[in-house]
Image: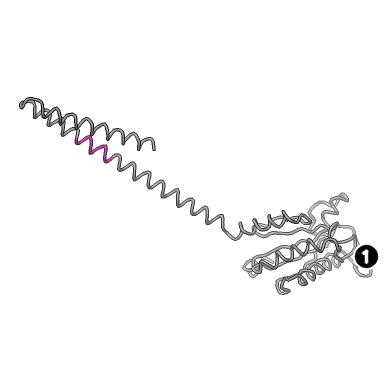
Amino acid sequence: MSDNKELKERLEQSERQRTRIQKLLARWPQEEEPFLWSMVDIMTLLLIFFILLYSTANNRVSAQATKLSQVEQNTSRMQSTPEREMRHEVDQLLATDQAFSVRWDQAQPVFVLGEPITFEVGRAELIPDFKSSLGDLADFIARHPGYQVVVAGHTDDVPILTARFPSNWELSTERAVSVIKFLCMHGVAPERLSAQGYAEYFPLQDNNSEQNRQANRRVEITLVKEDSHNSGLY
């Protein structure tokens, strides 16, 4: 823009000089006219030269402005992609309910339900106090029918041996099924849901402390885009 301003000032200066020479030409003796007319021609050529520079600068600025506008439009389109919209909605959900956490597997949200707020140790019935928060999550999932829902149960590495749960496989799977039944009762279509039980074989932390074991006892709800689901990712 400074170059553009400088060219404009030079154009105005050249025009003023050419006008002064024309006035002088009218007053000078006849024999000086060829010289003065030559000066007028030179000034006219300079004026034309500066006009061309001015026009080129304007075109360059216009092209840059057009390119900047295109970049802004492309950025706007990128910001409105389904992935960004989903991240924004998940952030809003977490802002109103912090009973669970979320991590992202590429573009897929994974809601993590820790055992202390979902199940008592060694049991597969949902804790009543957690049902309100899980209801909020069910409403959120029901509003996004374009996603399949994979519910996976996980345990720590401490063996369990009861009449109901001969191993951690049964415990992790039944916990996933308990969550699925709740989601179905709160508006999520059953055909969107699948249950998986991983026992202790996909821990978040090493099972070397009670705190880490507690973190590993969880249920994860992953929302999978239907096209990804059909391509065999799950």
Q: Is residue 107 above or below residue 184?
A: above
76 left or right, relative to 34: right
Q: Quadrant of the N terminus?
A: top left
The kind of residue tagged 1 is Leu
Badge 1 element: loop
Identity of the residue furthest to the left in this view: 31
- The quarter of the picture where residue 199 lies is bottom right
Residue in the picture at 72% in, 53% down = 95
Q: Where in the figure is residue 210, as x and y percent of width and height? A: 88, 51
**How many numbered marks does the figure carry?**
1
The crowding category of the residue bearing disc 1, from other C-alpha atoms within 10 Å (few below 14, some 14 to 19, many at least 20), is few
Q: Which residues are magenta?
A: 44-52
- The residue at 78%/69% (across/down) is 180
Q: Which colour style is shown?
A: one colour
**Which quadrant holds the C terminus?**
bottom right
Q: Position of residue 32 (x, y in %)?
A: 8, 26
On whether residue 46 falls in the magenta region, the answer is yes
Q: Residue furthest bottom?
A: 191
Q: Main secondary structure of the magenta part?
A: helix
Left/right of residue 48 with respect to residue 120 in the rendered view: left
| Relative horizontal placement of residue 24, taking residue 186 as reference (left or right) | left
Q: Is residue 145 magenta?
A: no
Give x and y (percent) for residue 223: 69, 64
Question: Residue 110 location in percent, x, y?
Answer: 72, 59
* Residue placed most toward the observer, 45 or 219: 45
Q: Circle 1 is placed at which residue position?
A: 161
